[in-house]
Amino acid sequence: MSKVITLNEYIIERQSDFPYAKGELTRLLSHISLAAKVVNREVNKAGLVDILGKAGDVNIQGETQQKLDVFANEKFILALKGSSECCGIASEENSEIIEFDTELAKEGKYIVAIDPLDGSSNIDVNVSVGTIFSIFRRLSPVGHKAKVEDFLQEGSRQVAAGYVIYGSSTMMVYTTGRGVNGFTLDSSIGEFCLSHPDIKTPNNGIIYSINEGNYIKFPRGVKKYLKYCQQKDDQTNRPYSSRYIGSLVADFHRNLLKGGIFIYPITDSNPDGKLRLLYEANPVAFIIEQAGGMATIGNGDRIMDIKPNDIHQRVPLYVGSRSMVKKALDFMEKFKEDKK
Ligand code: AHG
Ligand code: MN
Ligand code: MN
């Protein structure tokens, strides 16, 4: 049997990559993975919730039933609050930042932006969902409560980012800026085990992922790029395959491993794009760049260079294999003056 490396072993081993680190980031990542296991347990029995909870909406533990994204949010908040490394959170589920006020948490050096359950509209139909997180060092002084400015840092200042995909198997994929590694949950021992070391995304791929139902609302450059993807050309393996799950984590994960491009552009109804900079675009941008790919807002500007002005800010997202993103940008540039 080859040696199994658990996530906890791995992050402790890699702690020496950070000369200034005293183990806080290591512990923070461990706490996130622990909360992910709890969420995983609930996600896996999502189909049973109705059956188990029918009598007065109370489940067998006596807890009132909750929507899974609220449940996931609570679990991550609890894990991070108790971790003593994190002084505050920005979550998709909370309009304002959550500042932890315990003496222990105020000593925390890090803040976390999180989408506790991504793709939650897919949960009822047994399609993969995920959790996405982004970690920064705080700017405000240690010993005090977190401030909103701590969260409004450019993505290039992330110290770690990752996601958990609750799919046909559950995986945690993360980076601390030294490559990307993936760990698969072995539910028989309850541990994430290193299964995808040093992930590199192919420079080119044959998958494009976009909600084509919105075609009519897309900028002209995107429409032209989609037509390019659909044209026959044996040399470039076109037409490409269209794959769109509707969970960013699942779409991104597939394209990361296989090569591909994911686009959520501006549309008439979402003039700034739909996805959120802090807890959707930034973390996947950090991961894709570490894996050799690219993430931009569609005009060549890097996602991770955007200075946020709001914790729930939305951005257009073009992310994936380097050659594919560059090709999409060529079309955006060529047709940038055209309205539709
Ligand atoms: P969330 O479930 O966290 O609100 O995120 C949903 C997001 C993302 O996962 C996905 O890529 C996108 O919404 C899908 O949007 P459309 O349904 O507009 O394609
Ligand atoms: Mn989401
Ligand atoms: Mn969500």
Image (tube, helix red, strand yellow):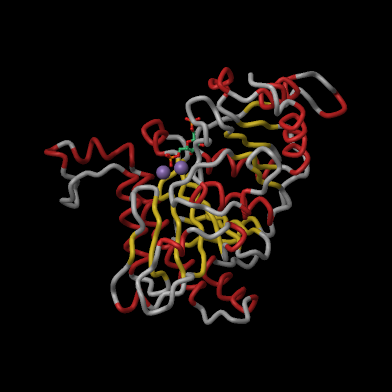
Residue 94 image offset from top left, x and y in percent: 33, 50
280 up-or-down from 159: above or below: above
Residue 45 image offset from top left, x and y in percent: 34, 43
Check the image and name the residue furthest to the right. 235
Quarter of the figure with residue 180: bottom right
224 lies left or right of 32 = right
**Can residue 71 be seen by looking at this rendering?**
yes
Residue 300 image offset from top left, x and y in percent: 71, 42
Q: Residue at x 19, y 48 (%)?
A: 60
Nearest the viewer among 225 and 148 is 148
Count of marks overlaid on the render: 0
Residue 155 image offset from top left, x and y in percent: 58, 57
Nearest the viewer among 145 and 240 is 145
96 lies left or right of 186 = left
9 up-or-down from 57: above or below: below
92 up-or-down from 149: above or below: above
187 lies left or right of 4 = left
Q: Quadrant of the N terminus?
A: bottom right
**Can residue 189 be seen by looking at this rendering?**
no
Nearest the viewer among 150 and 186 is 150
Q: Residue at x 39, y 60 (%)?
A: 89
Nearest the viewer among 131 and 157 is 157
Check the image and name the residue furthest to the left. 56
Q: Residue at x 48, y 76 (%)?
A: 24
Q: Residue at x 63, y 19 (%)?
A: 340
